[in-house]
Amino acid sequence: MDVTICGGLAVVETSLIRLLWPHHEVGVDSPYGIFTRHAWTIFLAQYLALKYYRIFLYHKYFSPLRHVPGPTNNHFFLGQTINLLKAETPTTLYVQWMKQFPDAPFIRYLSIANTEVLVPNNINAHKEVLQTQCYSFSKSKFFLRIVREVAGHGLILMEGDEHRAHRKMLGGSFSLQNIRKLEPIFKEKAKDICRFFEETIKNSNGMTGSFDCTNTFSKAILDIMGSAILGVDLNYVKPGEVHDQRQDGVAGRKQNGLRDRCTFHEAYDLFFSPGTVGKLLLFMNGWVPTRWLPLEANREFLSAMDWLNEVLTTIIRDRYRVIRAAMQDGTYEQKDSRDFVTFVVEESIRGGTAQMIGEKEFLGHILEFMAAGHDTSANMLSWSCYIMATNHSIQDRLREEIGSLSAEPSFVEMDKLPYLENFVKEALRMYSPSTTYHREANHDLTIEGIHIPKGTPLDLCPSVTHSNPTIWGADADSADPTRWEHLNAQQASPYAFEAFSNGPRICIGKQFAQFEIKTILVEMVRNYRFLTVEHPFKVENPGFTLRPGGLEVRIEKI
Ligand code: HEM
């Protein structure tokens, strides 16, 4: 863009000089000659001047956003980038800024090259961006560059009409009616987690045992996603069984080299919790392409991504083949509980709602569901254990309520428990698994009196409204599920609670996640007591999810 401007300027200047000195000889000493001889130097000088203006002057003296409040302890070129990376968690600074300016509709911070980023801060700003003017924003370029790598072209990356159409096509598979049919999958995995706890205690002192929350729930949720989305048994959390993870999803299939060693768990661990170099490359890739660099972290990443694409494509093709053949033979029996892949394949063969989904989008949707629904739900469960281990009264009340359920409660029964419902909301409010989601203004627009120029990036951070004391009161920072029993008008606004986002792009897996989380919580809490957090742990930063790395909780059987 700046190169085009400076190139255009050079052409205009050349024409002007020829116009002003038309009769002069066009020799080396004429103004035209001098100008053309130094054209590159002049172009470079103009380019640097423009860059200087954009990077160092614009945000200070000219931007319409310059009066929006925000942090001032900026690095001269990187703004808040280093501070954000060094913060305790990915949301710490956003919350700190909100507390400094609790009533401001937006907060402005500077990022790399002093790019201005807006953070919607009050309820109305969230409502405008997520609901009223949702399609005036698209996913930011920074976000696209990072996420496209692991998410393919699915719902998360679609915009405008394409997004609306696919949301409609996928609606059926995520309807409450269809999700209820997944009950046996959620229940079986909840039982597997408890069997794993039992074994952990047996292998410890026989009375109590401690488990790594992030690792355990990450595997358990991946198992659920395998069954509910792919229709494939992954069995990462099944104590006592030996499972050849190399054959995940593709029976009898072996691959060469690194791919041979890859599993779903390894692949997703690499995406969500890479090592320091991997993390740096992942986030730098949002600014400048880094995947071509000949580094081990890149090789591992690309290889895992290749593996994942290949395995998922095979699953889709195999499912089409098997279902189509059975339908043609007249032997196909539709099961009551259908995974997402089967649902879409059935629908598309029959000419139902999903028939317009091509293979590329199908793969993109699956990649996204696996990515979006995996770490978020796993982290939510980890933080739930943290709350219970550090607030025994909350845990006791939850157990008391769960005690009223039948031995094999249906989801309808579980869904009627008010304290469980409030506990889930409170855990999501306190520790929103989704740390930030990103947008960019498609055109100039004004929200809450702030003129937002086209192209302005926005970071939406659920913790900003979740921790705002002007919304949630002075005790906003402490866990209290009972606060949901008596909400005032502000707290009752859907935009005060942003864990699943809001508006047309609200999380499509919200009901799936709530159902899954409640089923697992009920089984765990009725069978195990969460005693203590074993040792200090670190929330991983940077991260798209709030991942309590190394959170270990001690449990005992009830
Ligand atoms: C506790 C669990 C979960 C949380 C906290 C969560 C949170 C979110 C948030 C905040 C968004 C909005 C992101 C944005 O606008 O950029 C989102 C979108 C999305 N989520 Fe979830 N999610 C969870 C579970 C799931 C599950 C289980 C699935 C799939 C099975 C899923 C699939 C998606 C998809 C496909 C989108 C994109 C929707 C669209 O753009 O129309 N999520 N989620």
Image (cartoon, rainbow, N blue to C red):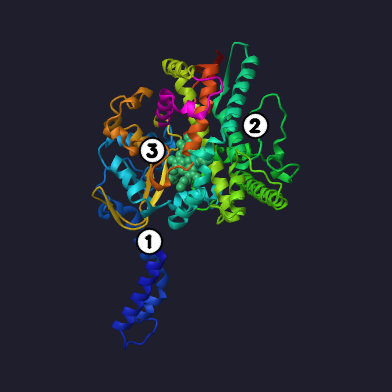
In magenta, the rendered stretch is 405-428
What amino acid does circle 3 point to?
Answer: Glu
**Disc ID at residue 547:** none
Q: Is residue 67 visible?
A: yes
Q: Which of the marked residues, 2 or 1, is nearer the chain's N terminus?
A: 1
63 horizontally vs 521: left or right: left
| Residue with the mark numbered 2 | 236
**Disc ID at residue 498:** 3
Residue 245: quadrant of the picture: top right
From mark 2 to mark 3, how far is it between C-alphas?
31 Å
Dot 3 and dot 1 residues touching (CB under 8 Å): no
Residue at 62 percent of width and 42 percent of height: 230
Indicate the position of residue 488 as horizontal and vertical percent values.
Answer: 27, 30
Dot 2: what SS? loop
Residue at 44 percent of width and 22 percent of height: 387
From mark 2 to mark 1, how far is it between C-alphas?
55 Å
- From this view, report whether residue 76 is shown above or below residue 412: below
For disc 1, does the CB lie below 8 Å from ligand 1? no
319 horizontally vs 399: left or right: right
Indicate the position of residue 33 as horizontal and vertical percent values.
Answer: 38, 80
